[in-house]
Amino acid sequence: MKPTSENLEMFLPKVRGRYLFDVTLASSTWFRVGGPAQVTFKPADVQDLCFFLQNRPVNLPVHVIGVGSNLLVRDGGVEGVVIRLGQGFTNMYVNETTIDVGAAVLDRNVAALSCEAGISGFEFLCGIPGTIGGALRMNAGAYGSEIAHILLNAIVVDPTGSIHRLTPQDLGLTYRHCDLPKDWIFIGASFKGNVGNTQEIEQKISTFLKERERTQPVKSQTGGSTFANPEGAKAWELIEKAGCRGLKKGGAMMSDLHCNFMLNTGGATAADLEALGEEVRQRVLEVTGVDLRWEIERIGIKDGSQIGEKAA
């Protein structure tokens, strides 16, 4: 017998964490849109996660999400298991100028901890919404710094449940990119900073936060930067040039404040948001010749498709 939507529960390994079935993911993303996951799994800890991976059904699709800050879940929902790392992955430990953290720790909390400990180099994390796991996955950056600049090594679990410790070189970190396959899961990392002055670090963080609030729609339902900056250019300038500032589709809109931010103005569907992003890409390509690359991750099935059909 093969797993189906109706009998999937009987094929899942007996874990210490929690399984939830057919629960919407909309409330788990900053856009507040998207359909349900067939299964949501919240592992108790690293060992529980590894046990699940070692004993899950063969070919069962697995996705990992954090706090959904740069994630668009399609309206048809997500096939297979969505893993959400929680309390068992929120460890933080300081040793001189090194900080070890779990993948579920919020980026801004690492910035705050570094300030308390007088460690510089982590200030930019205050401006990155989301978790360390997500920041590692996309080599997140802001204000001239990025994860690759401070990373010593990352701890990951492969699809068979084996744990590995990988260097930045192993991960192939480049601008908003990581070579690690999507089915490998970040569970923690070690970062290296420098001895700093707490007051100076605090002032730098304050300056970054004020600048972010002044230039970005931080109080809106958004997903952060929609597109990565092409080499030698800024995505927002290309979007502006293509006449897409304030462009709307259904309840979705490119922000007037920062036109590389896509907003759910109320009542938008994931289809509205994705279609708006694709229209912006097409207009930018026609006007500038540049093919913008999505920075927001999109997962799931387009509304109207059936479970088992992959979205384009």
Image (spheres, rainbow, N blue to C red):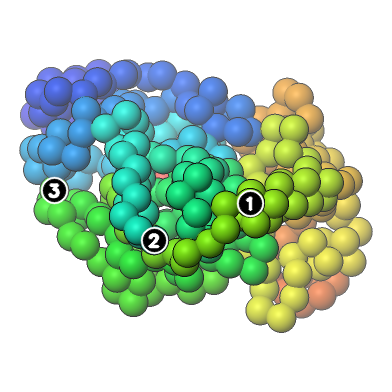
Residue 42 in the image: x percent, y percent?
29, 28
Q: Which mark is residue 161?
A: 3
Residue kind at label 3, given as amino acid type: Gly
Q: Which mark is residue 299?
A: none
Q: Are marks 3 and 2 in contact (CB under 8 Å)?
A: no
Seen in the picture, residue 226 relative to 234 is either above or below; the reply is above
- Closer to the N terminus: mark 3 or mark 2? 2
Q: CA distance from mark 3 to mark 2?
A: 31 Å
- Closer to the N terminus: mark 3 or mark 1? 3
Residue kind at label 2, given as amino acid type: Thr
Q: Is residue 279 left or right of residue 49?
A: right
The furthest residue to the bottom: 232
Residue kind at label 1, given as amino acid type: Gln
- Closer to the N terminus: mark 2 or mark 1? 2
Residue toward you, 210 or 234: 210
Residue toward you, 179 or 147: 147
Residue 106 in the image: x percent, y percent?
47, 40
User: According to the image, label 1 marks what residue?
Assistant: 199
Residue 170 in the image: x percent, y percent?
29, 73
